[in-house]
Amino acid sequence: QFELHRRELAAFSLTADRFSLWLRAMSIFGAVAAIALAVAGYLALFCPRVHNHPGRTAGIAALMAAAVALACLGTVVNPSLLSLTAIAPTVFVSVLLVIAYDQRMALALGTLHGVLVCIALDQPIGIYALILTGVSFAVFQLREIRDRHGVIRMGLYAGAALAVGTVVVSLIDRPIVDGSLYQAITDAGLAGAGGIGVGVLALALLPTIERAFDITTGMTLIELRDSKQPLLKQLQQRAPGTYNHSLNVAS
């Protein structure tokens, strides 16, 4: 079926008039450009610390482009993993943005990034709904990172939501025939694993994310006030009064 489809596309490219091919290419370009302008406009209006910093703007653009490329590459290599490859990259982008900046920005850019992925992979509204589900659960759970359990909990909640949503979307989009329920459950497992995998990956990369975006999460602050830190041990020994006062202020 894939070979027949590829031959049909090749034949169409040879026989169709150039205006139709050009019009389709320009329509895709226009849709992507509109989303890029929407991202730029949102950053300009609501995220001055990104808009006024060209390096951060370029970093976010590169991150979103890399995630789209990863979604395309993974889906092309193994289309049966679509429930994983089409959804997980966008959720991961949202997780990075909510850690580095805030919930509103992560939700807005994650929503727009999902549109880019659906355009690139030619996916229906059901996949976009699943992307929104994963993004929403991830962003809501990461309001503040105070410990590692919070990141893992985010992955579990997002994975569960994606698994349930995948079953629902699959049963709506596909005919109820032999094997469709098994396929829906398989896709749900892949989507759920993607959500959990995003949580594990975010936790593993958290120190790198903090250095890359020049931020300090609540979890790092809690670790820094550990009395076993060498500087705090020295302060506790040499100036216990100042140590206790500093610890109370930091808390």
Image (cartoon, rainbow, N blue to C red):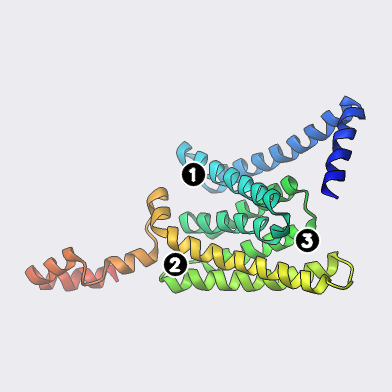
Asked which quadrant contains residue 172, the reply is bottom right
Q: To which residue does mark 1 refer?
A: 50
Q: Position of residue 121 (x, y in %)?
A: 74, 48
Residue type at numbered disc 2: Ile
Q: Residue furthest top?
A: 18
**Residue in the image at 84% along x and 64% along y:** 173
Q: Is residue 112 visible from the viewing direction of this image?
A: no
Nearer to me, 83 or 91: 83
> CA separation, marks 2 and 3?
31 Å
Horizontally, residue 241 falls left or right of residue 83, namely left
Residue 251, by quadrant, is bottom left
Label 2: element kind: loop
Give the label, 3 or 1, closer to the camera: 3
Pick whichever of labels 2 and 3 is earlier in the sequence.
3
List the residue tagged with mark 3. 126
Q: Is residue 169 above or below residue 28?
A: below
- Residue topped by disc 2: 145
Position above or below: 223 against 115: below
Q: CA distance from mark 2 to mark 1?
A: 21 Å
